[in-house]
Image: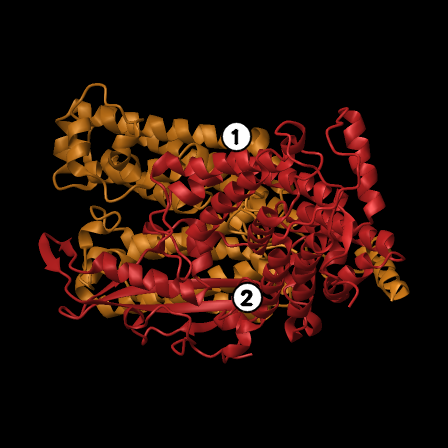
Amino acid sequence: MTKRIFFIGLLVVSSFSCKKEVEEEPNGFNKTELLRNLTDNIIVPTYLSMEASIFELQNAWTAFTLTQNASNLDDFKVKWLNSNLIFQKAKMFHFGPGLNHGLRAAYGTFPTDTSKVLNLSAQTNPDVYILANIDAIGYPAIEFLIYRPNAFSLLSGSPTQRQFITVLLDKMKYDLDNVLDDWTTSYATQFKQSTGTSSTSGFSLLINAFNLEYELAKNAKLGIPIGNQSLGIAQPQYAEAPYSGKSLLLLEENLKFIKAVFQGVNDAGSDGKSFADYLVSLNKQSLRDEILNEINGALSDFDNLSDNLVVEIQNQPATLDALYTKLQNLVVHFKTDMTSAFGVLITYQDNDGD
Amino acid sequence: MKYFNRNEQISIAPLVVFRLLFGLLTLFGTIRFLLKGWVDEMYIQPHLYFGFYGFEWVKTLPGDWMYLPFILMILGSLGIIFGFFYRWAAVLYFLSFTYVELLDKTNYLNHYYFVSLVAFLMIWLPANKNFSLDVAWRKKKSFVSIPKFNIQILQLQLACVYVFAGIAKLNSDWLFEAQPLSIWLSSHVDIPVFGELLKQKWIAYAFSWFGCFYDLFIVFFLLMNRTRTVAYFFVIAFHLLTAYLFPIGVFPYVMISLTLIFFSVQFHEKIIVFLKDRISYRADNKNNIEFTETKSENLFYGFTFFIVLQIIIPFRHILYPGDLFWNEEGFRFSWRVMLMHKEGLAQFYIHDSKTGGEIEVMNSDYLTRKQEEQMSTQPDMLIQFAHHLQQEFKDKSLKINNQTYQIKNPTVHANVYVTLNGRPSQLMISKNVDLSAQTYNLQHRDWLENFKD
């Protein structure tokens, strides 16, 4: 008996020193490569293009404040949408610098509190940095001010409202500069090396942020407005971007990006290691295919929908319900099948050990 | 049987060493728990708790008062270490620790259960009868030897942990699929040098089979003089390896320390003599006084009953039909450690019969992340949460679009999908089941979908 246990023990111990296996690994997947791809090709470039879009927004707003005409306002609206669409990507990375600087809430809390916005924008020194005003800043607040009925004449007639938008844009730039600074100076290096399975590792933060982002898209951008949390009674007042009517466009962009991250591809066409590749390396091709099928199926529903959720709640509630059901089915794959395959821990407390 | 001779006397040294180690470990464990901020996270922040069946009356203390049991645990641990008002200290530790463990099954761990059991045994053991402040300061009588069963009960308790953990591994997932170890090991793919190796299927098989063999037989090798040293080397290697690979807290160190109870009397006496010399402790009686109190006979039968229970409890699952890992009926308190990897998604719905409308529940409105994670795969927690939701929504008035809706008799439903040991997820609870109509008890839960392998 002793000899046998010794033998098995030796087998295990000696297998540790058997190094040549490393080179023979067929598809050579590793999480460091995945995190590098995400960081260098997706996360940092997304933040950079967001920075550029905010720079454009600021310029367009300066142009409008100097020359108040309808075409300058229209130009600003175009820049607003462009920048908000990029934010639909950047907000996924709600960990590390993005979390520390509260980017997601500061940029995208909706529905915006219109009376708060009007109140603040009437002040000469509005405090847009306090948490209490989180629902009166960012893209939703700006959207209200520039898309509300008679926006042009109201803005032209109110220097404090024009100043308020300048202040909001300054804050957005300030927050984003901080996030980018943290990523490029130190966080990226640390993040790329953090491949463990504890919940504080970069890889776990990423997969958890990915799952949460998906659920947030499903619930906040669709489920709540169509009435899934209110006895089936639609609540269009909870729709995102109701003044511009771009709610479904933002959701679609959000979902497209979730798919892009899953596949590890970016706008410039680079294709690197991703969750999809990780699944394949674990012999879970069928799960990868199922996820892609389902997300493509959901995305194709947008072909039959306009950009405006409030309108579609009236016109095509059944299509929205069907879309929601598809998104709900996909959560199961992300949160149970994929997360379990990766062996990631959600909490960092002790586990049942041996 | 010679091993179980009730009257046989043995040196008290192993018990004293055990007392010191156990006290140090519980002290360390408590301080670690406090420093990690877990008291706040696990026992102050949550809105509701998942009590154990029959123990739902055990409630948390309000707010920061929850730190009190942990302070008592520290006092108890110190009393155990120094053997100072030892029995009171052991009672204090056992009660405060067990109280906290009974609050929420979210935090159930086999090693916490183990600590509770050992703390309970410590109450009855004469571990302060030598090298203690009770002897040196409070002038209690000291003893050199005690009835051997006082040591054996601890050995048997440890044997239960290992052997049942080994028996639990005798299942097809563990032995023939190398699951869940395959999942866990392959997630370490980025460890330098060994990472790629840990992804290899044969490594997962080697770990699984070795782990099973280790658990089943390590106690026998520790009991035999001839193999003890080698076996203990394996104890250290095995537990350090698991500590490195898996986030299992203090458990590896508990096992490495407490298995010393299997070592010889001479080994423990050397430790005690060394320690006594270091601090010039001379209080113990030099005469060979045997500890033979009349109540020790009752204690022997009490311990026998305790161990019989320990042997029966892990087998109670045979009373239930269906798959043990899926249904988790009779799963806890049975040393089923590291046995499965489950991930679940539980979407609850409140159905209002009056309007026919439905409310999708955000679990995170009621539960912490960890509670939600644990609840999503464990049927008894799912039903407890369903009942909580029913109470929550009963007679609740909701304001929707400036109109008030009064919910009269809500029913609770859920779609629950679970993946077990790497299989594709499958339905565990169908939305058709009215969970609010099911009672929470220890009977078989026939409203669970059958597990399809």
Q: Secondary structure at mark 1?
A: helix
**Which residue matches tag 1?**
A182
Residue B201 vertical position relative to residue A100 in the rendered view, above or below: below
Mark drawn on residue A57: none
What SS does tag 2 mark?
helix
Q: CA distance from mark 2 to mark 1?
A: 33 Å
Where is residue A90, by image quadrant?
top left
Query: Residue A86 or A135: which is nearer the viewer?
Result: A135
Q: Quadrant of residue B346?
A: bottom left
Q: Chain of mark 1?
A: A
Residue closest to the eye, A170 or B281: B281
Residue A87 is left or right of residue A348, and the answer is left
Could you tell me residue A129's position as x and y percent? 31, 26
The image shows residue A193 at horizontal and vertical percentages of: 65, 41
Q: Colour of chain B?
A: red
Extreme residue toward the left, this view? B403
Say whether marks 2 and 1 touch (CB < 8 Å): no
- Residue at left offset 43%, top offset 63%: B345
Where is residue A354? Give x, y as percent. 66, 56
Quarter of the figure with the N terminus of chain B? bottom right
Q: Is residue A215 above or below residue A114?
A: below
* Chain that is orange in the image: A
| Residue at the disc numbered 2 | A288
**Residue B414 point in image, percent of width and height:** 34, 68
The answer to whether any part of residue A293 appears in the image is yes
